């Protein structure tokens, strides 16, 4: 558990660096550090399925960001400008949301069962009956593609919509007049 | 988009095929080992992106890659929906697993329609990530500083 706390502190530090640094390339590297720390955390919590996806997507997103930054500019021009009157509103709203997040998070964690100590009814059904009902040795796949396949269809639809949005904004051919 | 140095090209020539095969393995063995359609599709897309970054592309190659990746993405999504509808019409429920007890558990031929769903999602995710990359890294959008 101590390693996980150290990892979380490292992630917070890397996140602050990613927001505050002036060089955009260094900011992207810090963001990649956060992502790989998430992957290490998944491995510590015994979730290799998620860790594989996280590592690959993190590499790809860092490559995307670096490709865009190498084509455009290195310097974050929004940092270091003096504060204006409208910023106070932003700070107040952000503080309210942060307080509400902490409050509901603490209430939620107090109500949950301790992680991986007691199994709920649904989880114990997946573990005991999953192999007999689906035939898949990997229980994560049996949940993702059999018990909760409709969720996977929604996830695929989200990815499809994201690609449609990117292709609509950055299309290779202009509109003919 | 221009290619990279000969060092990168040689390494990409050696490593690229292995990355592709590893992605196919993750997709096909998704019901036996960690991974599955999403992870394997992302690895396949990473291999394709490595090849495109290392060797460079011309405008016509980008155009054809954009068209073909759109076609593959739609095909993967429609295959996944087809498996779901087969469950509806043959088994009675949307997304029901057909023949879950066919084959022995732990071997490649098992788990009914789960491997087919994995393959469909793998095609879809690989094509989606590749199409985003092709559009973002195309020669048309190289900005001048």
Image (cartoon, helix red, strand yellow):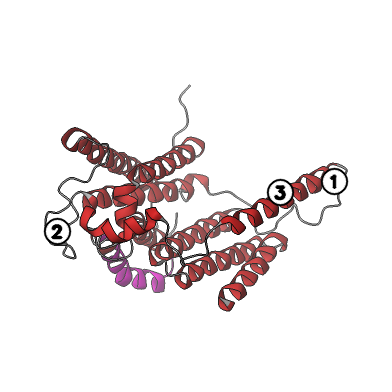
Alpha carbon separation for disc pair 1 and 3: 18 Å
Q: Secondary structure at mark 2?
A: loop
Can the viewer see residue B36?
no
Q: Secondary structure at mark 3?
A: helix
Badge 1 vs badge 3, beta-carbon distance below 8 Å: no
Quadrant where the image shows the N terminus of chain A: bottom right
Q: Is residue A127 magenta?
A: no
Label 1 environment density (alpha carbons within 10 Å; few <14, some 14–19, many ≥20): few
Give yes or no for contact between labels 2 and 3 (Cβ–Cβ under 8 Å).
Answer: no
Q: Is residue B126 left or right of residue A113?
A: left
* Nearest to the observer: residue A19 or residue B15: A19
* 2 or 3: mark nearer the eye: 3
Q: Which residue is mark 2?
A: B109
Crowding near the residue tagged with mark 3, few <14, some 14–19, many ≥20 C-alpha atoms within 10 Å: few
Q: Say which label, 1 or 3, has the lower sequence index.
A: 1
Q: Are marks 2 and 1 on the same chain?
A: no
Q: Which residue is mark 1?
A: A88
Q: Main secondary structure of the magenta part?
A: helix
Let me know if marks 1 and 3 both belong to one chain: yes
Q: Which mark is residue A113?
A: none
Question: Disc 2 vs disc 1: Cβ atoms closer than 8 Å?
Answer: no
Q: Secondary structure at mark 1?
A: helix
Which residue lies under the disc numbered 3? A100
Residue appearing at x 49%, y 60% in the figure: A63
Q: How far apart are labels 2 and 1 at the CA level?
A: 62 Å
Question: Looking at this view, is B111 or A165 the one in front?
Answer: B111
Q: Is residue B5 left or right of residue A24?
A: left
Instruction: Pinpoint residue A69: horizontal percent, then vertical percent.
Output: 59, 56
């Amino acid at each position: 558990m101590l390693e996980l706390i150290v990892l979380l502190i490292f992630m917070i530090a890397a996140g602050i660096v990613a927001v505050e640094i002036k060089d955009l390339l260094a900011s992207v590297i810090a963001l990649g550090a956060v992502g790989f720390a998430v992957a290490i955390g998944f491995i510590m919590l015994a979730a290799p399925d998620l860790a594989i996806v996280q590592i690959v997507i993190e590499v790809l997103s860092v490559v995307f960001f670096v490709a865009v930054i190498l084509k455009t500019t290195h310097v974050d021009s929004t940092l270091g400008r003096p504060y204006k009157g409208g910023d106070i509103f932003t700070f107040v709203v952000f503080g309210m949301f942060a307080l509400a997040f902490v409050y509901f998070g603490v209430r939620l964690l107090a109500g949950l069962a301790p992680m991986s100590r007691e199994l709920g009814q649904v989880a114990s059904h997946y573990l005991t009956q999953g192999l007999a009902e689906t035939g898949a040795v990997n229980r994560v796949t049996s949940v993702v593609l059999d018990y909760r396949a409709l969720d996977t269809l929604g996830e695929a639809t989200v990815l499809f919509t994201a690609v449609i949005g990117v292709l609509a904004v950055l299309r290779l051919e202009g509109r003919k007049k | 988009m221009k290619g990279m140095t000969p060092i990168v090209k040689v390494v990409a020539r050696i490593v690229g095929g292995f990355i592709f095969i590893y992605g196919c393995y993750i997709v096909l063995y998704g019901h036996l080992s960690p991974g599955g359609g999403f992870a394997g599709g992302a690895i396949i897309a990473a291999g394709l992106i490595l090849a495109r970054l290392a060797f460079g592309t011309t405008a016509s190659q980008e155009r054809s890659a954009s068209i073909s990746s759109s076609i593959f993405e739609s095909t993967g999504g429609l295959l996944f929906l087809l498996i779901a509808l087969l469950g509806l019409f043959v088994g009675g429920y949307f997304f029901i697993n057909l023949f879950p007890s066919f084959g022995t558990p732990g071997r490649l031929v098992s788990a009914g329609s789960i491997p087919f769903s994995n393959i469909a999602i793998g095609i879809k995710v690989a094509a989606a990530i590749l199409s985003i990359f092709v559009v973002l890294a195309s020669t048309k959008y190289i900005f001048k500083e």
